[in-house]
Image (tube, rainbow, N blue to C red):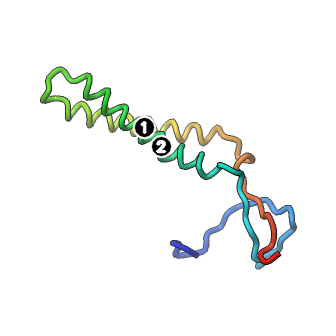
Amino acid sequence: MMFCSKPRQFQVDNPINAEIGDEVIISIAEGAILRGIGLIYLLPLLLLVTGAMIGSHWAALPGQRDGYAATGAALGLAAGFSIAKWISSRQDRNQSRAIIARQWGE
């Protein structure tokens, strides 16, 4: 158990009919982790930077740029997380579902 204070539980498909207590190897679809990272981290970060640039551009006076940039960044970040949540809710769960690939030691 790395970085966990208590055992984690996940729902996975069991095509090999493993039983409780069996040590198994879990497999997920290729690219699922990278897609998740891009969706959860990169999309909000990209929209945060874009919002800051747009906010800074909209400032009428040079002294207002920081405030407009901060507001734009906050709005971009909120939009990024909202869009990521919406995309995540629309994705097919079976496409990235984990399965028990084989028993440990086989």
With 40 as the anchor, is 57 left or right in this view? Answer: left
Q: Which mark is residue 42?
A: 2
Q: CA distance from mark 1 to mark 2?
A: 6 Å
Residue on which the image places disc 1? 46
- The residue nearer to you, when weighing 16 against 34, is 34
Give me the residue at 52% from left, 75% from top. Answer: 5
Give me the residue at 65% from left, 50% from top. Answer: 32
Label 1 neighbour load within 10 Å: few <14, some 14-19, many 20+? some
Give me the residue at 54% from left, 49% from top. Answer: 37
Mark 1 near mark 2, Cβ–Cβ under 8 Å? yes
From the image, which quarter does the N terminus lie in? bottom right
Give x and y (percent) for residue 34: 59, 49
Label 2 neighbour load within 10 Å: few <14, some 14-19, many 20+? some
With 98 as the anchor, is 50 left or right in this view? Answer: left
From the image, which quarter does the C terminus lie in? bottom right
Give x and y (percent) for residue 23: 75, 76
Residue 1 to residue 68: above or below: below
